[in-house]
Image: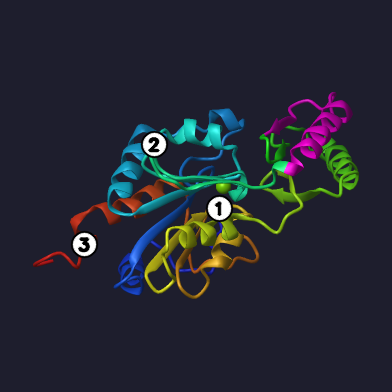
């Protein structure tokens, strides 16, 4: 695996804690490719029990938000915790922990166009073996990981054509996936800032630590540029706004585990 020219977040854990000293650490963590490994089909990305326990421990100490392109019900079902925040559908659906007043649904007026586009894609690409078209309410994902390379050009052409039919839809590429999203300026970064503002947490009070592997995570990285820690996970990509790097979900777990151990609690008496 190519390592980008970035320092390892694990090796620089102390520096990251130092940067955040005097502020509340908050965690914004992507799901696929970050908390769990990428899988051939989205439904196979099941969260290991130890990762769930770790996230639960982290959420006892800090604000934890899982930011994902998945739909809210899907994401919540996979993570299975009611003590964390969820920002699903790239931040278009935000929900707080159990009992929290945090609740956002953005882009409801785009759902009809997204549903129509999904149907159009189903019709045009019905014969493409391995293609998965996932309707997520506030977005549509066209996964082509299992599609033969020789057929991927056909998929790309159809996706671009269908996207062109709807002014309400924006097409965004991801890792072996095309995403149809509402043509709003909303993204994971805007959702992150919205959540902090709703919780009355000013930038001087919190230190966001963002982890993600995909292009959409760059929006979250950009949102905290200069006042948070940003960690790109997985293979190198040419351009990233991240300050740090981790190879994969196992190292993400190792990194997060450091924050639930006493060593991270420097402010404790005698610590
Ligand atoms: Mg991801």
Q: Which residue is mark 3?
A: 265
Q: Is residue 250 magenta?
A: no
Q: Which residue is mark 1?
A: 213
Work out whether mark 3 precedes mark 1 in sequence or the reverse, and give the earlier one. Answer: 1
Along the line of sight, which residue is nearer the eye, 263 or 228?
Answer: 228
Please indicate, yes or no, whether residue 236 appears anywhere in the rendered image: no
Judge depth for marks 3 and 1 and give the one in front: 3
Along the line of sight, which residue is nearer the eye, 4 or 207?
Answer: 207
Q: Quadrant of the C terminus?
A: bottom left
Work out whether mark 1 precedes mark 2 in sequence or the reverse, and give the earlier one. Answer: 2
Mark 3–mark 1 contact, CB under 8 Å?
Answer: no
Along the line of sight, which residue is nearer the eye, 102 or 158?
Answer: 102
Q: Secondary structure at mark 2?
A: loop
**Res. 40 image quadrant:** top right
Q: Secondary structure at mark 1?
A: loop
Q: Which residue is mark 2?
A: 81
Along the line of sight, which residue is nearer the eye, 251 or 184?
Answer: 184
Work out whether mark 3 precedes mark 2 in sequence or the reverse, and give the earlier one. Answer: 2
Mark 3 C-beta closer than 8 Å to ligand 1: no
């Amino acid at each position: 695996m190519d390592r980008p020219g970035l320092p390892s977040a694990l090796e620089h854990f102390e520096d990251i804690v130092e940067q955040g000293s005097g502020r509340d650490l908050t965690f914004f963590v992507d799901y696929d490719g970050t908390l769990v490994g990428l899988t051939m089909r989205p439904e196979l990305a099941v969260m290991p029990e130890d990762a769930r326990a770790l996230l639960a421990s982290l959420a006892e100490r800090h604000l934890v938000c899982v930011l994902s392109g998945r739909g809210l019900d899907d994401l919540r079902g996979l993570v299975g915790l009611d003590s964390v925040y969820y920002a699903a559908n790239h931040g278009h659906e935000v929900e707080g922990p159990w009992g929290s007043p945090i609740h956002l649904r953005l882009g409801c007026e785009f759902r009809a166009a997204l549903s129509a586009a999904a149907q159009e894609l189903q019709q045009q690409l019905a014969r493409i073996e391995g293609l998965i078209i996932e309707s997520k309410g506030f977005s549509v994902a066209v996964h082509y990981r299992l599609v033969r390379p020789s057929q991927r050009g056909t998929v790309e052409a159809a996706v671009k054509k269908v996207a062109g039919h709807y002014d309400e839809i924006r097409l965004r590429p991801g890792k072996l996936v095309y995403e149809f999203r509402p043509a709003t300026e909303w993204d994971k970064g805007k959702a992150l800032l919205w959540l902090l503002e709703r919780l009355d947490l000013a930038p001087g009070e919190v230190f966001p630590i963002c982890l993600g592997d995909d292009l959409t995570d760059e929006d979250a990285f950009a949102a905290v540029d200069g006042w948070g820690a940003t960690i790109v996970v997985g293979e190198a990509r040419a351009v990233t706004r991240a300050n740090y790097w981790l190879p994969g979900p196992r190292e993400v777990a190792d990194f997060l585990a450091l924050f639930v151990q006493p060593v991270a609690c420097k402010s404790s008496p005698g610590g």
